[in-house]
Image (spheres, grey):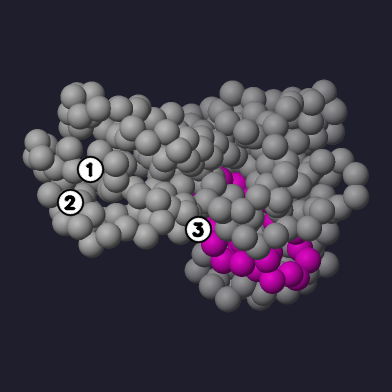
């Protein structure tokens, strides 16, 4: 049960608490008297008791339980803190100063799922390596067995919604999220994104390039991790403080490398940008320089290899995404990478 219990007869206070609950994406139960309050007292994950009924509730001494808070307007007299103790409340929340805290506490109820998904960053070792395509392939394969989302952190890229065939789907884009503040609910983000079955995508509207806002990126990654089994972040190759922060927040960073002399030379520079080489792995696309030589040059292990895929542009143009079959080159490589990362994650747990 995720519905909090609000106990008050003060209509102004109730209206404010309902507003905060709506902002948090939860639908509360409301009790206007002590008898109704007792019926939902034990089952609710959170109980907010209005100061106007706290004394009545204290006199009947309900069973002690966690996550009970008294809510009052403005400054409260010392007597109210004694009443709160009698009710078994953990604290007294004073509005409007406690509004942000109450919203965050209510938002956590909407994120009651224990999921803490794996966050994988994907970037190109050189221009034209196919990092965006591989990021989308990872999302497609992962979505067949769980909830996945691909996050587009490259304002100058093609747009992952176009690569995945989701450009006609309604949903929030970065420009909408960059205008918001406060805590972002995992459920609200998941339900707001353009989506096909288990796969969601966060990208940019067509038109002039946007700009990533650090606070919005932090909230998106936190909410995406809580609400999905896998989060894939398509990272640009450009050096930028926000991009570097996103890369540092990833559990694993995949660098897609074209195994040519020029491609490897560029990949060496790309890998050197990241201060923690233990979290970086290489994915090779095509043939050429041997994997062992690439590992020696970059100091990074090769996680998977894949050949170029025939009919890739046609599949994307048809709105099918890069992976039409798990037996395709991209499908097999994405599956191999996800299996290997699952083993690494399990070993670290």
Q: Are marks 1 and 2 in contact (CB under 8 Å)?
A: yes
Image point (82%, 53%), residue name:
210
**Residue matched to label 3:** 251
**Foreground disc of the pair 3, 2:** 2
Give the left or right position of residue 95, taking residue 90 as reference.
Answer: right
Say which quadrant the C terminus sits in: bottom left
**Residue matched to label 1:** 54
**Residue matched to label 2:** 83
Q: Residues within 10 Å of mark 1 (few under 14, many from 20)?
A: many
- Report the magenta residues as a range: 225-254
Res. 64 image quadrant: top left
**Foreground disc of the pair 1, 3:** 1
Residue 296 drawn in magenta: no
The first of marks 3 and 2 along the sequence is 2
Give the image location of residue 264, x and y in percent. 75, 67
C-alpha span from label 3 to label 2: 47 Å
Give the left or right position of residue 21, taking residue 288 as reference.
Answer: left
Res. 261 image quadrant: bottom right
Answer above or below: position of 132 versus 211.
Answer: above
């Amino acid at each position: 049960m995720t519905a909090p219990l609000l106990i008050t007869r003060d209509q102004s206070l109730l209206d404010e608490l309902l507003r905060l609950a709506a902002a948090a994406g939860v639908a509360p139960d409301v009790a206007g008297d002590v008898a109704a309050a007792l019926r939902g007292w034990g089952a609710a994950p959170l109980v907010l008791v209005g100061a106007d009924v706290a004394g009545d509730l204290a006199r009947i001494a309900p069973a002690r339980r966690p996550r009970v808070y008294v809510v009052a307007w403005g400054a409260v007299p010392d007597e109210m803190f004694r009443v709160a103790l009698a009710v078994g409340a953990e604290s007294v929340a004073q509005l409007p100063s406690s509004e942000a805290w109450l919203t965050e506490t209510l938002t956590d109820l909407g994120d009651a799922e224990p999921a803490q998904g794996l966050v994988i960053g994907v970037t190109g070792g050189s221009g034209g390596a196919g990092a965006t395509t591989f990021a989308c392939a990872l999302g497609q394969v992962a979505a067949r067995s769980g909830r996945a989302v691909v996050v587009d952190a490259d304002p100058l890229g093609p747009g992952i919604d176009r690569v995945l065939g989701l450009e006609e789907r309604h949903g929030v884009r970065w420009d909408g999220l960059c205008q918001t503040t406060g805590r972002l609910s995992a459920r609200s983000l998941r339900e707001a994104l353009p989506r096909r079955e288990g796969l969601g995508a966060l990208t940019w509207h067509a038109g002039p390039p946007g700009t990533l806002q650090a606070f919005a990126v932090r909230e998106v990654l936190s909410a995406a991790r809580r609400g999905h089994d896998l989060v894939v972040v398509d990272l640009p190759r450009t050096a930028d403080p926000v991009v570097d922060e996103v890369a540092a927040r990833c559990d694993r960073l995949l660098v897609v490398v074209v195994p040519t002399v020029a491609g490897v030379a560029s990949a060496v520079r790309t890998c050197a940008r990241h201060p923690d080489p233990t979290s970086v792995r290489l994915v090779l696309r095509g043939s050429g320089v041997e994997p062992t030589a690439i590992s020696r040059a970059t100091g990074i292990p090769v996680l998977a290899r894949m050949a170029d895929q025939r009919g890739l542009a046609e599949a994307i143009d048809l709105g099918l995404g890069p992976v039409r079959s798990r037996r395709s080159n991209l499908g097999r490589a994405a599956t191999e990478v996800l299996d290997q990362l699952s083993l690494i994650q399990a070993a670290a747990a």
